[in-house]
Image: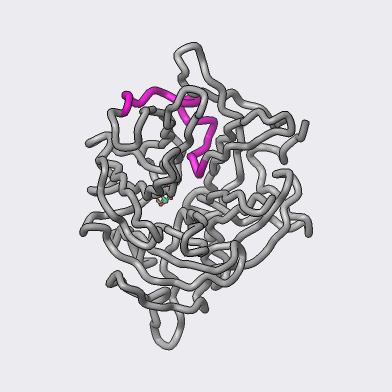
Amino acid sequence: MTRLQPNGTLWTDTDGNSIHAHGGHMLQYDGWYYWYGEDRRDNIYVSVYRSKNLVDWEFRRHILTTESLCEPYRVRTDLALFHEINGQKKKVNIERPKVLYNAKTKKFVMWAHYENGENYLDARACVATCDTPDGDFIYHGSFNPYGNMSRDCTLFVDAQNDAYFVSASRDNADLAVYRLTEDYMNVDRQVHTLFQGEFREAPALFYRRENGKYYLLSSWCTGWNPNQGTCASSHKMNGRWSLNYNFGDKTTFDSQPAFVLPYEKENGEVVFLYFADRWGGNGDKYFTSSYVVLPIRFDEYDHAYIKWCDACEI
Ligand code: GAL
């Protein structure tokens, strides 16, 4: 059994520094868990840490910053990673970075939510790549998939090995589900438009082999303030999804979903860990969050639920 760092705190890395991986994502690669997330300090956008046991986190690198290399590719994008105002670099916003490994191209591909740094009106997706999980990522720019608005987002690979980008569209009213191209560098098809007019954001997906169902957690739209989380499920990403039912309490234990990690215990049992942010609020200039991590359980109807624990044992 492993006891995770306490919930509702800013977890620390092996140097004793706070972990800045907000609105993040985790990728299992080569025996490591890589934790990517927002880091708004100085000129940084995205940082990555790694761990073998989810307790001891080694800081690896600030993988996307205002200094990152920008390279165009076949998709027409806006390559600006900052604005120049009176000779000063003004940062844009890069939120909810998610990273997948593409075995065909051998690239680590990041998708995130881009905004211009002034307001949330651009509502774009952006893409960056790297040859290693924790090297300097190359930025390939931001765009509106099929012209759609695209805000809170996630990446997910299904049981057939198809990759998806899911993002809040139409001013957050709907959640668009896009299958990605083979190289994960573009959307290939919009396969679903979920929860019409339900204003769900902060999507996080997982698949339970046991019952062959996909589960999608999301929050409602109340900015940095927490609200009632929900969950829905389906046998297919492009199939009929269940209605959203409540997940957690009225504030989802004062948290908002970042991602779900399928964690394999030594005995082979898979535990789904709800990783979430407890945002610092508008007064916090670095938009940091503390972390809330809870094991997801399932009731007799196979509905997902969570219970509070101060520092969970996994
Ligand atoms: C939240 C969203 C965050 C951030 C924030 C800005 O609803 O989940 O990622 O975009 O709004 O107000």
The C terminus - image quarter: top right
Where 119 falls versus 251 (above or below)?
below
Q: Residue sitting at 26 percent across and 40 percent down?
A: 192
Residue 16: image quadrant is bottom right
Q: Residue sitting at 53 percent across and 20 percent down?
A: 298
Q: Position of residue 122 (x, y in %)?
A: 29, 62
The N terminus - image quarter: top right
In magenta segment, residue 212: no
Residue 278: image quadrant is top right
Q: Residue sitting at 48 percent across and 67 percent down?
A: 129
Q: How many marks?
A: 0
165 left or right of 4? left
Q: Position of residue 29 (x, y in %)?
A: 62, 53
Where 307 falls versus 72 (above or below)?
above
198 left or right of 256? left
Q: Nearer the viewer, residue 278 or 234?
A: 234
The chief SS type of the magenta part is loop
161 left or right of 260? left
Q: Position of residue 246 (x, y in %)?
A: 42, 23
Q: Nearer the viewer, residue 170 or 33?
A: 33
Q: Position of residue 15 (x, y in %)?
A: 78, 59
**Residue at far bottom of view:** 87
Q: Which residues are magenta?
A: 241-259
Residue 86: image quadrant is bottom left
